[in-house]
Structures are given as C-alpha cells and as structure tokens.
Image (cartoon, helix red, strand yellow):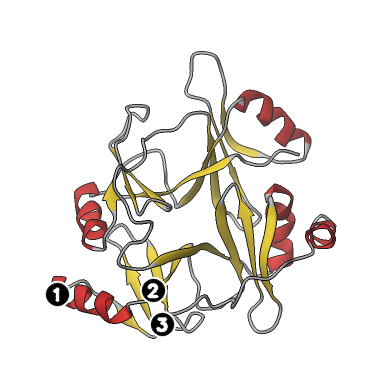
Amino acid sequence: MRGLGRFLEFSVPTTDILESLDYYRLLGFSEAVVGDIWPHRYAVISDGVLNIGLHTGRFDAPTLTFVRNDLAQDAERLAEHGFEFTARQTGQESFNQLRLEDRYGHAVAILEARTFSGVDEFDDDSACGTWIELTLPVSDTVHAAAFWGPLASSALRIREEGPTHLRFNVGNLPLGLSEHRALRQPALCFKCQDTNALLRLLDRHGLPYARSPDFENALIRLIAPEGTTLFVFTADFLGELYEVDESGARDNFLR
C-alpha cells in the first residue's frame, strides 16, 4: 500500500498569527511564501526542514499534514485497507483533501497540492538546533504502530527499555511514538549543540522556558504562543542510529 505522501507541515491552530511568527523568528525560523488555497489566514515558518503551518481556521487541533498526487485514487486505496476518514473532499473542481485520525485521535491531513513555497534562505537549523522528530503521546506503542507502521517507509529506531519509544520515517517525517507519561500533547524535539547560545537568546528576548522538564532528560521545554511544545536536548535521546529489521517489525505491527 502506498503511504500518506510526503510530509508537508505540522499544522497548528492559532488565534494570533503575528505573535506566533514573531516568536519563531526570534528562534531563528524563517517565513515561507504561502499561496491562496486556504480561505483563512495562514502562515508557514520553517528552518528549511521542519515546516510549521499557523492556521486561523480549518484546523482545530495539531495536525500532521502530508501532500500527494492522485488523491482521489489513493483515498480508495486507503479505504480498502480499513482507514476511515473524518472528512473527505475529492472532486475535479475542489481543493482535494482527506482527514483521518490515528488510533489515539491524533489528526492527519492529506492534501493534493502544496500550499506554500520553500524558504529561499535557511540553514536547516534554528537556534533550537537540529530537528529530531515530531513526537506523539500514546499509551501503547505497538497498538499505535499498527496504524503508522504500514504507512512508514522504514522504522528508524526502537527503544524497548524504560518508556517504550518507536521512531518511523513517514513520508520523510521522523515520527516518534512515546509512552512517556510526561508527554501530554504532540511535541517537536530538537538536538542543540550550542545550548548556552540558546539560553542567552531566550533570556535576552524574555522568552519563557522550563529547565529540565520531565521528558527524556530534555534540557528545556518551550511553549510557543499558539501552544506548540518544543523540547530541546543536548543529544538524541534514542542514541546512535542503528539498523532495524523492518520486515519482522512491520509484520508484528500488522497483527
């Protein structure tokens, strides 16, 4: 089965786009050029790899948004594999899109067209460092992986000891599934090599943060104006990358 497509953005609802834009700019993100597909006000902030979509409408909760061609045909394939849509709009004269939820209610959107252009100048890192993954809180990673595993091109990392954590590549999205009790909502995780510079920047601009939050030994936790959680680490909390036997893992996820 074909997957969800290519990861486009982490879409989040906001009531004040300018406040969120100012916040991310201070952290070293850049604004992308957006189109006029959406009827509501919309902006995208990016570090060149991670795109965060700021929406004043149509998105009621944080959403993992993907883009792909031939969406009407793919909708039939997904339906045949048991995926149920919370919304479906496919037609020759419409902006085609699908909405669905994973087993824990995390929202997913699939669009047929891009809604913004790339950022002209970026370093692939903000002041927060290198983006590690987008992490979803789940109570049972194997149960959650039964949804995400078949849609992933590969399993990247697995930690079985302690709070179980799985990481998949879903359309170039490094997606984490975490049983950690301190994780309350989807979060963006970063690995920062110059944490002193980041702390000086936060203090200089008066941006609030929490030191040593109780999640995977993170250094700090940031909360953006629209409510997005960002965790900053000094190293990847899953350790060094290693090969995963995807065939056996995927067979187990599908049971």
Look at label 1 and name its amino acid.
Arg
Q: Is 64 above or below relative to 165?
A: above
Residue placed at 51% from the left, 80% from the top? 216
Between circles 1 and 2, the one closer to the viewer is 2
Residue 52 lies left or right of residue 101; in this view the side is left
Between circles 3 and 1, the one closer to the viewer is 1
Q: Earlier in the sequence, mark 2 or mark 3?
A: 2
The Cα–Cα distance between marks 3 and 1, rounded to whole angstroms, is: 21 Å
User: To which residue does mark 1 refer?
Assistant: 204
Residue 250 lies left or right of residue 162; in this view the side is right
Position of the N terminus, as image quadrant, is: top right
User: To which residue does mark 3 refer?
Assistant: 213
Q: Is 111 above or below relative to 29?
A: above
Look at label 2 and name its amino acid.
Cys
User: To which residue does mark 2 refer?
Assistant: 192
Which numbered circle lies on residue 76? Answer: none
**Is residue 184 or residue 189 the one in the foreground?**
189
Q: Earlier in the sequence, mark 3 or mark 1?
A: 1
- Contact flag, marks 3 and 1 (Cβ < 8 Å): no
